[in-house]
Image (tube, rainbow, N blue to C red):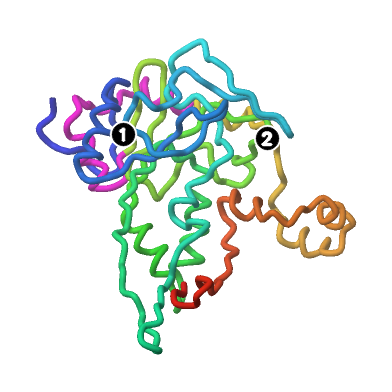
Amino acid sequence: MPEFTPNIGAFISIGKDELRVILGALKEAGYTLVGPTLEEGTIVYDEIAGVEDLPVGWTDRQEPGSYRLQRREDDAFFGYVVGPHSWKKYLFPSRQTLLKVEKVNGSFAVVAKEEPTPRYAFIGVRGCELQAIHIQDRIFLSGLYQDPHYKARRQQVFILAVNCTEPGGACFCASMGAGPQAREGFDLALTELEDIFIIEVGSEVGAMMVRGTPWRPAGAFELQQAREALAAAKKHMGRQLDASDLPNLLYRNLNHPHWQEVAERCLSCANCTMVCPTCFCNDVLDVSDLQRQHFE
């Protein structure tokens, strides 16, 4: 076993069983693991205990209006497509208390109750999902006004990305330059081959997490296999989109009848806002109890 950590930017190779060691190291470092797991016939993101909760040997078949979970012929750890959940629910929760006020002796007092910021390790983030997180970063972390709640959560996150080698029927990340390979913003990025993981080290923290594994520098043949798998995924995207003039195309069609068709189907449930990984729509509400003694 190496007695040193790999360099940032290095490509290393580990056996698939060693993923258990990496997840264990993350837990020992105080991270809560969040990753893909099976729930009610779908692959969703939720808190996991370790490798045993991953959808090993499962895949999903996605087409417009269709989702089916299927058994694979192998024991791939990440042989599925991006599912119905996004990482946004952990970085930008749908409900969050900003301020609490109580009425005491006829006057109002702010209740100072700071909750600890969760420390998440995201397991299995795809390239397109990383791009979505970066868009949220631009909204909440750039400019004069920054969201302190988002910032606190974002700074604590460890990202273990997975390069996508099996795109779905509705995938088009290659057209948007958002995949299938994770390019930046990760601590570790895995490419899953038949018996091993090729890992690109993206940060010092990521390097520390693989130190306890018997890693070795990835060989030329292994790197070629990884490149070929990603090239095949890019070639077999379910959809293609010409994004060269996309902003102007949308501006030219602001009053297109299609938008009215969409509006007629809308139930105003806001589910699209919650599941969209890039949407940052939000509202601030004041609520109180019936006695009007407690306000949030």
- Which stretch did the figure color magenta? 201-228
Task: Give the residue furthest to the bottom.
Answer: 106
Picture layout, residue 172 above or below residue 258? above
Residue 225 % position (x, y) = 43, 22
- The alpha-carbon separation of the residues under discs 1 and 2 comes to 30 Å
In this rendered view, identify the residue nearer to me: 270 or 29. 270
Query: What residue type is disc 1 on?
Result: Phe
Q: Say whether residue 25 is visible.
A: yes
Question: Do residues under tags 1 and 2 come within 8 Å of each other at their CB atoms?
Answer: no
Would residue 230 be seen by someone viewing this image from the given angle? no
Query: 225 or 291, which lies in front?
Result: 291
Q: What residue type is labelled 2?
A: Ala
Category of crowding for the residue at label 1, using alpha-carbon neighbours closer than 10 angstroms: few (below 14), some (14–19), many (at least 20): many
Tell me which label, 1 or 2, sits earlier in the chain: 1
Residue 123 lies within the magenta run: no
Q: Is mark 1 on a helix, strand or loop?
A: strand
Determine the residue positioned at 70% across, 35% down: 239
Percent from the top left, x then y, of residue 127? Answer: 49, 42
Crowd class of label 2 (few under 14; some 14 to 19; many from 20; radius 10 Å): some
Q: Where is residue 12 in the image (x, y as percent from the top left)?
A: 28, 30
Left or right side of 120 for 66: right
Identify the image quadrant of the N terminus: top left
Q: In this view, does 166 lie above or below 30?
A: above
Tell whether position 203 is magenta: yes
In the figure, residue 11 lies in which quadrant? top left
Q: State the residue at coordinates (68%, 35%).
A: 170
- Residue placed most toward the observer, 153 or 97: 97
The residue positioned 34% from the left and 26% from the top of the image is: 51
Picture disc at residue 170: 2
Which residue of the protein is positioned furthest toward the top in this rendering? 73
Q: Residue 11 carries which label?
A: 1
